[in-house]
Amino acid sequence: MPGILDLGMNINSILVFFSIITMTVGNFTAIFQTNMKRLLAYSSIGHIGFIVAALACGSENGLLAIPTYLLIYTLMNFGAFLVILLIKSRINSEDIRDYKGLGYKMPFLSVMMVIFMVSLAGLPPTAGFWAKFYVFTAIMESKLYLLAIAAIFNTVIAVFYYFRILKTLYFEKSDSAEVLPVLSTGNKTVLALLGVPLLILGIYFSPVIELARETLKIAGF
């Protein structure tokens, strides 16, 4: 029996180490990216670190945080990538430096980008805040204080590079006066279906928690 417990503690330590390394490497690398796709790809590594952090807690709340985080992450990440693709189809670039002033030239796409970026950063009033909140709660309940410090540190880093994108959209002047193509109704609808739930669930998150609980029951946890 002691051997099994020791093995459990070793696995827990490995998960904590892997979580800290993954989120730190992903977020630090994302800081230096100017290509939007690469930035989101590296930030995704950081988000994987948060999911591993929930697993490392080894608790019921930790397990509950995993499907919760995955559902919200899927919405906001897929939405962000779609915005990047739609912007590229209009300006033929994925470089952040070419996003200058697009907040005024592409208002709908830019507003949707704001929603996805704020949610990815884990800030209210979006569902991304609650996704990270449940991970932090599980970490603190499990008394994994080093992991908590690393998670807070990495959240600050993520806020920096996500808001750098928003700063470029709204606070830097465009170098071009080119009129850009209007977004189709179909594309607007898809983005709204991805972005609006992040705002609604940011206010009323209970359905996500209940869905996560049912998912865990079905999985046998």
Image: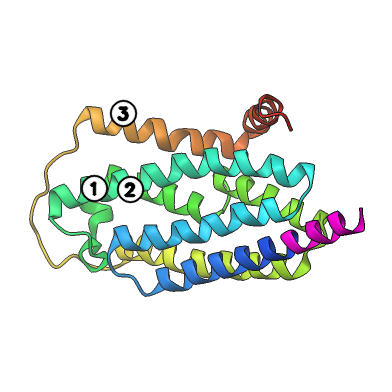
* Residue 133 in the image: above or below residue 201: below
Q: Name the residue located 77 percent from the left edge and 50 percent from the top edge.
A: 58
Q: Quarter of the image for the C terminus: give it.
A: top right
Give the number of the mark in front: 3 or 1.
1
Mark 3 surroundings: few (<14), some (14-19) or many (≥20) residues within 10 A = few
Q: Name the residue located 44 percent from the left edge and 44 percent from the top edge.
A: 76
What is the x, y in percent for residue 1?
A: 92, 53
On the image, numbered disc 1 is attached to which residue?
85
On the image, numbered disc 2 is attached to which residue?
81
Camera sees residue 106: no
Measure the alpha-carbon separation of dots 2 and 1: 6 Å
Q: Name the residue located 46 percent from the left edge and 41 percent from the top edge.
A: 74
Kind of residue sitting beneath label 1: Leu
What is the x, y in percent for residue 31?
A: 41, 72
* Residue 165 in the image: above or below residue 187: below
On the image, numbered disc 3 is attached to which residue?
189
Residue interval drawn in magenta: 1-11
